[in-house]
Image (cartoon, grey):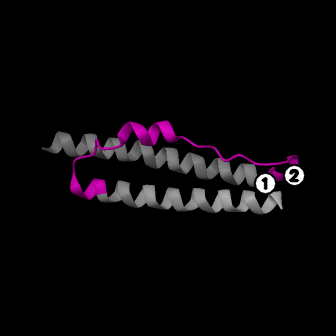
Amino acid sequence: MEAKVVKDLDKFEMILQAYEYEQQAALVAAGDATSGQVHPLRLDDFFASTAGKIKCDAVRSWEAALLSLRASQHLQVEAMGECDEL
C-alpha cells in the first residue's frame, strides 16, 4: 500500500515540476516578448504519461487541481496571443 502511494507521489512530483518549468519559461518568454510572437513552452508529454495512472484518491485530486490550473493558465496565454494579433 505504501509503495503505491509513493509511486503516485513520484508521478505527481514529476508533473508539478513540469508545470513549474512551464511557468518559469513563460516568465522568461514574457520578458523577451520584444522579439515577436511568444509561443509558450508546453510539456504535454509529461502530463500525458501520468494520465489515468495515479490511483490514490488524495493524489488524484491534487493532479486534477494542477491540470485545471494549468489549463486555465494556457487559455489565458492563448487569449493574450489573440489580442497581440489585432
Q: Residue 73, how many percent across, how many down?
A: 57, 60
Label 1 crowding class (10 Å Cα cut-off): few <14, some 14-19, many 20+? Answer: few
Say which amino acid is labelled 2.
Answer: Thr
Residue lying at 22% horizontally and 56% vertically, measured from the top left: 57
Q: Which residue has dot 2 on it?
A: 34
In this rendering, position of residue 31 left or right of residue 34: left
Q: Are marks 1 and 2 in contact (CB under 8 Å)?
A: no
The N terminus is located in which quarter? top left
In this rendering, position of residue 84 left or right of residue 61: right
Q: Would you say residue 56 sits in the magenta stretch?
A: yes
Residue lying at 63% horizontally and 63% vertically, measured from the top left: 76
Q: Residue 71, how many percent across, how many down?
A: 51, 57
In this rendering, position of residue 19 left or right of residue 7: right
The C terminus is located in which quarter? bottom right
Q: Would you say residue 26 sits in the magenta stretch?
A: no
Residue lying at 71% horizontally and 46% vertically, measured from the top left: 39
Q: Secondary structure at mark 2?
A: helix
Dividing the picture into quarters, in which one does residue 61 lie?
bottom left
Q: Residue furthest left?
A: 1
Q: Which residue has dot 1 on it?
A: 31
Q: Secondary structure at mark 1?
A: helix
Say which amino acid is labelled 1.
Answer: Gly
* Magenta stretch in the rendered image: 32-60
Q: CA distance from mark 1 to mark 2?
A: 8 Å
Looking at the image, residue 6 lies above or below residue 77: above
